[in-house]
Every structure is written in C-alpha cells, then in structure tokens.
Image: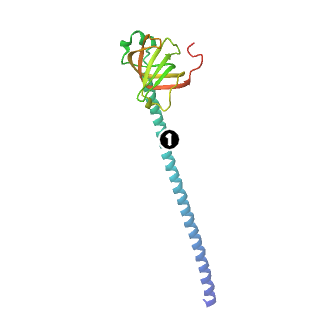
C-alpha cells in the first residue's frame, strides 16, 4: 500500500476507533446510568417497604393503645350507681366505678384536690372525689361537667356551713375527664 493510502487507512481506523470508543463510552455511560437508576429504584423500593412496615407498626401500635385504653375504661364499667354507694357504702368499698356529674366545689391542695360533685347534676346526690393534682395538666373548676374513674373508699363526713353533719360517698379518682362548663340545664 502506498504511504498516502496507508495514512488514509490509518486515519479511517483512528476515526473508527474514536467512534467505537465514543460508542463504547456512551454504552458504558448508559449502562452506569441504568444501574444507578435501577439502584435508586431499589433503594426507593426498599425504603417504601420500610416506610410501609413503619406505618404498619404505627397502626398496630395505635390499635394496641386503643385496645388498652378501652380495657382500662371497661374495668371501671361496674354498673355501680350513686344510690348504691350512698345506701350501702361498705359493700362497695374497694370497688372500681365511674360516675358523671357537675363540680359544685373545688378545694385545691399541694398533694390532693377535693371535688364535691353533684352526680348527674343532682345537688341531692353529692360525691366527694379526691385526686392527685399532679396527674392532670389543667385545673378543674366549679360548674365543670366531669366523669371520674376511681375506687370507692366508703364515706366521708364533714360539717356544712350551717353546722350540720353531712356524710357522702368518697371516691379516690385515678382519672378524670373534664368536659368544660356543664350546660345550664344539666341535671334539671
């Protein structure tokens, strides 16, 4: 081959080699890109599975907490009424119960708060409810409608402002739900 033909052939070969190199480089780059995007997709997939697992865990945890709260509330659903507590306090001493009423007096202390509660808004059916004020983040006020869950402790006697002795059922509250101010017609 003549030297000029050889130079042209070498030039074509070099061009072809550069083109092949570019093609191979593009293919490698495309393959790397595909691998990266597949890898990112796998990461996203595993992350979504992890998130789904976390979500399922949160849902399961919420269901367990709800079931526990329901079981906790149910242990106080003993059907004990105000009338039973007032008539036969010794029979119900040490029993769990829950009642609802309107707060007619609050006596706050550092370690104990006492509430006089008119059950179902009836001022003739009063229970003395005692609780640890550190168990609540907000104060309970007079005229609030509350539902208390606790333990019957028999009765408590005190002297009225007119000097008469008053004996009422006594309950140590474990939990108190405060609905805010009772409606003006509550109990009437």
- Looking at the image, residue 81 sits to the left or right of residue 26; the answer is left
Q: Residues within 10 Å of mark 1 (few under 14, many from 20)?
A: few
Assign the C terminus to one quadrant of the image. top right
Q: Position of residue 182 (x, y in %)?
A: 56, 21
**Does residue 126 appear anywhere in the picture?**
yes
- Indicate the quadrant where residue 132 lies: top left
Of residues 47 and 106, the one drawn nearer to the viewer in this rendering:
106
18 lies above or below 126: below
Q: Position of residue 159 (x, y in %)?
A: 43, 14
At horizontal 47% and vertical 25% (from top left) the residue drawn is 176
**Does residue 2 appear anywhere in the picture?**
no
Q: Secondary structure at mark 1?
A: helix
Q: Position of residue 181 (x, y in %)?
A: 56, 23
Of residues 12 and 85, the one drawn nearer to the viewer in this rendering:
85
- Looking at the image, residue 72 sits to the left or right of residue 39; the answer is left
Assign the N terminus to one quadrant of the image. bottom right
Question: How many tags in the picture?
Answer: 1
Residue on which disc 1 sits: 55
Q: Residue furthest bottom?
A: 3
23 lies above or below 116: below
Q: Position of residue 34 (x, y in %)?
A: 55, 60
70 lies above or below 163: below
Of residues 112 and 164, the one drawn nearer to the viewer in this rendering:
164
The colour mode here is rainbow
């Amino acid at each position: 081959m003549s030297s000029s033909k050889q130079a042209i052939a070498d030039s074509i070969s070099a061009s072809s080699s550069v083109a092949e190199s570019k093609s191979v480089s593009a293919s490698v780059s495309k393959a790397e890109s595909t691998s990266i995007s597949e890898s990112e997709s796998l990461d996203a997939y595993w992350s979504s599975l992890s998130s789904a697992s976390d979500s399922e865990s949160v849902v399961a945890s919420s269901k367990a907490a709800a079931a526990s709260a329901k079981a906790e509330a149910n242990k106080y659903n003993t059907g004990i009424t105000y009338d039973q507590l007032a008539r036969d306090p010794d029979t119900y001493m040490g029993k769990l119960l829950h009642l609802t009423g309107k707060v007619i007096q609050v006596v706050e202390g550092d370690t104990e708060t006492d509430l006089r509660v008119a059950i179902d808004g009836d001022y003739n059916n009063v229970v003395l409810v005692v609780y640890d004020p550190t168990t609540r983040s907000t104060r309970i006020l007079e005229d609030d409608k509350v539902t208390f869950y606790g333990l019957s402790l028999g009765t408590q006697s005190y002297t009225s402002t007119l000097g008469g002795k008053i004996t009422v059922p006594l309950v140590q509250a474990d939990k108190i739900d405060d609905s805010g101010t009772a409606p003006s017609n509550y109990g009437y």
